[in-house]
Image (spheres, helix red, strand yellow):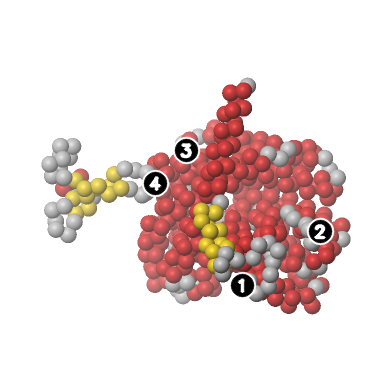
Amino acid sequence: MQVFERLVHYIVKIVTALNELLWGDMFVLEFSNGETQFGISLLVLLLIPAGLYFTIRTKFLPFRLFPEMIRTTLEKKSGDDENSISGVQALIIATATRVGMGNLAGVVAAISFGGAGAVFWMWVTALIGSSTAFVESTLAQIYKEKDPLYGGYRGGPAYFIDRIRMVTRIQHEDVFVKDVKSEAEYVAMDGKTYYTKGCKFNFLGIAFALSGLLCWAGISQVIGNSVSTSFKNAFGIPQIVTTIVLVAVSALIVLRKNATVKVLDRVVPVMACAYIAMTLFIIIKNFNHLPAVFGNIFSQAFGLKAVAGGGLGAVVMNGVKRGLFSNEAGSGSAPCAAAAAEVNHPVKQGLIQALGVFIDTLVICSCSAFLMLLAPDEVINGLEGMDLLQGAMNYHLGSFGVIFIAVILFLFSFSTFIGILYYARSNVAYVFGNTWAAQTGYKIFALVMLFIGGIAAYSFVWDLGDLGVGLMTIFNMIVIIPLSGQVMAALKDYEKNYIGKQNK
């Protein structure tokens, strides 16, 4: 028993250290004699420059091709395979997982620690991240493959990571090569130097897939705890009752072959529209306060107005970090759904998923932000976490507001859970092969995690989720940057041959 406890202790220390490496400050930039500090984490250092690089390389695609994003999203499915999904269905699945805890708890945390100005930097992060989402989702389409289990298509970072190779030179005197010319895949300009592809990177693909499965298991536990706790606070329902119902309903969906997409098709639009409609009602009700809210957002964003969270650096970095966590651009999760879409050009799904980042951050996250910022300071002062959002909703709508948030949290979390199990399909297959036993085994494992989370909170599991998404991002970004040339070629072809023309 003592050996087991010691082992667990060391595992916790390792996970904590890795999370600190990924999410903690690698270094701090100081300005104005140390009065303004920007703590830069490894993931921020990786994602923000990459997002800017992709934005510039695509000639500011999020702004230039925004109308095309809307048009492609509204297009009908291009193929007739009943088991494949349309571009908009892939968007709905990705939105279901993005529009989860990050849109409620993430925005709450950003405002709690970074003030109103953090909202502006979440918006900026979304504009930058949409280019990254375009690149990774287009790659998923380029390298998708037929799914022998569920039908349709599958793919994602594990599958296009698999296409990276080390290029090695073949020597004429190499005793292992019988015929240099026939075995070489490339010939240099001199006509004498031969190269071949070797060193298949299975390891990185497996590492990404396992990181994703780890992340989604951790998120399952957090979802269970968030839903059961909110229903206990709003309705007085015991956590065990809520948990049993949640697990039973989820099991009925995820253990059926292709029920996930059908359910999300109905749940996601309803919950998003209800949340947006309620926010618009509250905005109209408090319209005279709106100029002051925007004033606080922009003044605090640039340090023109002091904020209790620790100055301009805290405002900027809280907004950036929470924005990255919320929209998931660069993490490699959304491409798992993007690969399953049946579209007649890979760029179309890239554009659709880039729009998904806008929907997540500029629309849904902004809704959460305005709900809190339109409440008077005396109502929300001293409140943190979900208490902040519930306090604001109680001010706006009384007890109905608290109940509404509990129901919305349930829908957001429920759709996230069944969405991440859709993501898990292709990664389970990549690691364990095309077997129903592996597919069902992981689903049951996730349901168990959902149940455990519903009856008790385990912070270590949440740490595992953070570690999983951090590692996913590292492995994904290692590959999409060197492979981005293929995306640029596809974009050039799309703009030349598809935009403004009737697709056949």
Question: Quick one: label 2, few (<14), some, or many (20+) residues within 10 Å?
Answer: many
Mark 2 or mark 4, whichever is nearer to me: 2
Residue 391 badge: 2
| x and y, in percent, of residue 435 in the image | 50, 34
CA distance separating discs 4 and 3: 12 Å
Q: Which quarter of the rendering shows the C terminus?
A: bottom left
Q: Secondary structure at mark 3?
A: helix
Residue type, mark 4 in image: Asp
Sequence-wise first label, 1 or 4: 4
Q: Is residue 86 left or right of residue 233?
A: left
The residue under the point 46% across, 61% down is 50
Q: How many marks?
A: 4
**Residue 234 position in % (x across, y down):** 83, 50
The answer to which image quadrant residue 318 occupies is bottom right
Q: Nearer the viewer, mark 3 or mark 1?
A: 1
From mark 1 to mark 4, how far is it between C-alphas?
43 Å
Q: Residue at x 62, y 23 (%)?
A: 2
Which secondary structure lies at badge 1?
A: loop
Q: Amino acid at mark 3?
A: Val
Alpha-carbon span between mark 2 and mark 1: 27 Å
- Disc 1 target residue: 302
- Of residues 5 and 374, the one nearer the viewer is 5
The residue labelled by disc 4 is 162
Q: Nearer the viewer, mark 1 or mark 4?
A: 1
The disc, 4 or 3, on the residue closer to the chain's N-terminal end is: 4
* Disc 3 to disc 1: CB gap under 8 Å: no
Q: Residues within 10 Å of mark 1 (few under 14, many from 20)?
A: some
Going from the N terminus, do you reach mark 3 or mark 2 first? 2
Q: Is residue 124 left or right of residue 495?
A: right
Label 2, secondary structure: give it: helix
The front one of 77 and 157 is 157
